[in-house]
Image (cartoon, helix red, strand yellow):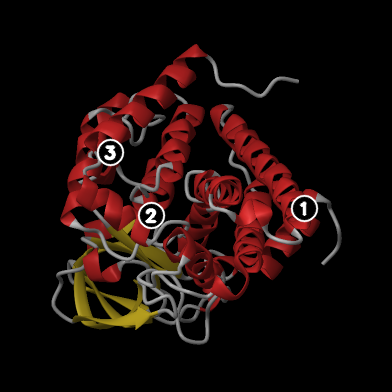
Amino acid sequence: MEFSFNEREQALQKEVRSFLAREMGPQLKEEMESWEGSTLRPRFSEGLRQLLRRMGKKGWFGIPWPKKYGGQEGTFTEQYVVVDEMTYQGVLPDRESLAIVGPDLLVFGSEEHKREFLPSITRSELVFCIGYSEPGFGSDLGGAQTRAVEDGDDYVITGQKIFTSRAHEADFCWLLARTDPQAPKHKGLSVFLVPMKSPGITIRPLINMADIHYFNEVFFDQVRVPKRNLVGEKNRGWYHVATALDFERTPILFPAGPTRRALDRLVSLVREGGLARRPGVALWRQRLAELAIEVEVLQVLCYRVVWLLDRGKVPNFESSMIKLFGTELSQRVAQAGMGLMGLYGPLLRGSPRAFLGGLAPRLSMVSIPTTIAGGTSEVQRNIIAQRGLGLPR
């Protein structure tokens, strides 16, 4: 079997590659390299905003979506071609909007929501954060306690969210809140589009050990949201979230590009950086070859999911396979990099003796939470076992 893109997809890949080589100036390239290998963007700089907007004008975001909502009515494979090439070149798209909010609005959003938000997402003009997890309720999203109470033409929201991605630079929060406290655990939940400039919202940064500000604590104190910002049907938010999580774990959010780039950089270091003459390098060559095979496996898993999406199916356990295998593979690549560089491995960017700008230690630190965020590896294994293999609980 031949796994290759058709002529249209190959042309798109070349166009994206040429565009990025032409449009990324020295300052932006320096910024990209400062967090290379990470799937977490430390900040949404103005240079990156402008680059993404230029890409949006070329119609490269929301490619499978209907044209009346700003899409191209293309394929998910074409969208993956764009995202995979972007991330391989070190550029992360606005993945929360593109992979979670947009697809869920297409399924559950009102016509007003679709016309208001989807074109802005395709133009990369709006930034969304994801308000799911709460203190005490991480992977167990059904336990959410943030309350949304009807009051006239509004809902009044009170509660706290934690590990909220990019809340400090988001325009809207995709918020899960409890609208019926008397309903069973997974009932009585609803999803809202909450403007982040609303009075009553307080944001506190959560800085990880890689010194990246990506997650936050967000406090909602009597925040008023118009009823029209309720997404879909009241008290059926769990079904929206379940669908969004299936989209979240697809290759649009977890492409192979960043891991493939990190591994290629390690290989080039061995070939060109003087490491080829080190004692024991033959063992590391074998380890890198094994990792290269694993990266190809990840790429094939990604192709499978976009193939399913192009046939109108919502991948479930298949998406969990990508999330599980891809995030754990990024950790294995990071560990290989640290071992390959020996005692120089822990040196961070800025040290004159750091290899690849401190890529290995940075990837080591940022890859740790990837097996937790979006559903832990244990959750993914349960999904694969129960829904994929049909095993009992």
Q: Is residue 170 left or right of residue 97?
A: left
Tag 3, which secondary structure? helix
Q: Say if mark 1 contacts mark 3, CB within 8 Å.
A: no
Q: Position of residue 320 (x, y in %)?
A: 65, 54
Q: Quadrant of the N terminus?
A: top right
Residue position for label 1: 282
Q: Position of residue 120 (x, y in %)?
A: 21, 43
Residue type at numbered disc 1: Ala
**Is residue 185 shown above or below 250?**
below
Q: Is residue 296 left or right of residue 202?
A: right
Q: Quadrant of residue 3?
A: top right
Looking at marks 1 and 2 on the same chain, the residue that comes earlier in the sequence is marked by 2
Q: Position of residue 110 (x, y in %)?
A: 31, 45
> Which disc number belongs to residue 122?
3
Q: Position of residue 139 (x, y in %)?
A: 57, 73
Q: Say if mark 1 contacts mark 2, CB within 8 Å.
A: no
Q: Residue at x 67, y 39 (%)?
A: 296
Mark 1: give few (<14), some (14-19) or many (20+) Cα within 10 Å. Answer: few
Q: Residue at x 33, y 50 (%)?
A: 94
Report how far apart the C-alphas of labels 1 and 2 lie in the structure. Answer: 41 Å
Looking at marks 1 and 3 on the same chain, the residue that comes earlier in the sequence is marked by 3
Q: Quadrant of the C terminus?
A: bottom right
> Which disc number belongs to residue 96?
2
Looking at marks 2 and 3 on the same chain, the residue that comes earlier in the sequence is marked by 2
> Which disc number belongs to residue 49?
none
Mark 3: give few (<14), some (14-19) or many (20+) Cα within 10 Å. Answer: many
